[in-house]
Image (spheres, rainbow, N blue to C red):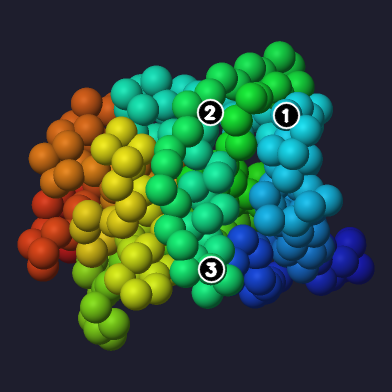
Amino acid sequence: MMGSLASVYERIGDARREFGCCDTTFRVQATGIRADAAVTEARNTAEALEAQLNAFDRTSAVAGLNREGEVTNEHVARIVRRGLEYYDRTSGAFDIHQGHVEHELKSFLRGDTDTLPATFDAGTVRVDGSRVVTDVELDLNGLAKGYIVDRVREALAGLGRREFVSGGGDMSPPTGPVAVESPYGDATPLKVLDTDWYVATSGGYRRSRNGTDHIYDSTTESIGARHESVTVLARRDCMEADALATTLAGLPLGDAKALPTEWEGLEALVLHEGVFHPTEGFETHVLDA
């Protein structure tokens, strides 16, 4: 009996790991039975998904889709299906049809070119099971990182374990208080969250060059975040938090404040010109609010 108990306790631990993924640092943590094996599986999951979803890797499924106009891949299909859902629900503010805009913007931000995208695309996309067909290049970046966070969390989960995933500003439900980073470079966080919802933060301060960042609004064909930062809490999953943080970051202030109030299971904090604009329920997710 004593030997059996010792064997059980040997398998219980607290394992953490950091690694690069999606142009940011992923941090994974598991506490409980077989924690070390869980974080190893989590990293393998993240790297395998990034290899399929990185539009800038010619061997990826997304690059193949943008090059050939079709691909059969269950992960791409899930992301595209959700992207089309958000395209409809946001009246086009979240737009996966802008793959060439994404590529030109990223090339500019990396310093590979000095030219910004001049036109925005329209096109059609169809999903049938795991098969995706499109006549326009797709931008899945507003969903891919959140999707990977969700799948990595699944890889970490298990009987007798607690898990947490953070990928840049996107994270699974925290296991304790977490800070919302200030876009001004201050050590003091904007807020400290105490929530069991998924979290995503977006803003131009994360990636910019010469005052231009990676955010765009295809409804007005404008480039650049309109706010210093946007933090979104979503009950559904990290993919939803990721998509809506990206969407709100590109919208005018009035629209960015209005959209979350019409969305069940969503709270948001928009920081605009130094002023906080939280939704009514956001403060219920803030420590000592």
- Left or right of 256: which side holds 222? right
Closer to the N terminus: mark 2 or mark 1? 1
Q: Amino acid at mark 2?
A: Arg
Q: Amino acid at mark 3?
A: Thr
**Residue corresponding to mark 1:** 69
Residue at left offset 55%, top offset 45% = 100
Taking the spot 37% from the left edge, 53% from the top edge, the residue there is 215
In the rendered structure, which disc, 2 or 3, sits on the residue that comes first in sequence?
2
Q: Amino acid at mark 1?
A: Gly
Whether tag 3 and tag 1 are in contact, CB under 8 A, the answer is no
Identify the residue under disc 3: 113
- Answer with the quarter of the image where residue 131 lies: top right
Question: Mark 3 packing: few (<14 Cα in 10 Å), some, or many (20+)?
Answer: few
Q: Secondary structure at mark 1?
A: loop
| Figure quadrant of the C terminus | bottom left
Q: Residue 219's x, y, as percent?
A: 30, 33
Report the residue marked by disc 2.
82
Pick the front one: 225 or 157: 225
Compare marks 3 and 1 and give the one earlier in the sequence: 1
Residue sticking out furthest to the top: 128
**In what element is the residue under mark 3?**
loop
Residue 111 position within the rendered picture, expressed as x and y whole percent measured from the top left: 52, 74
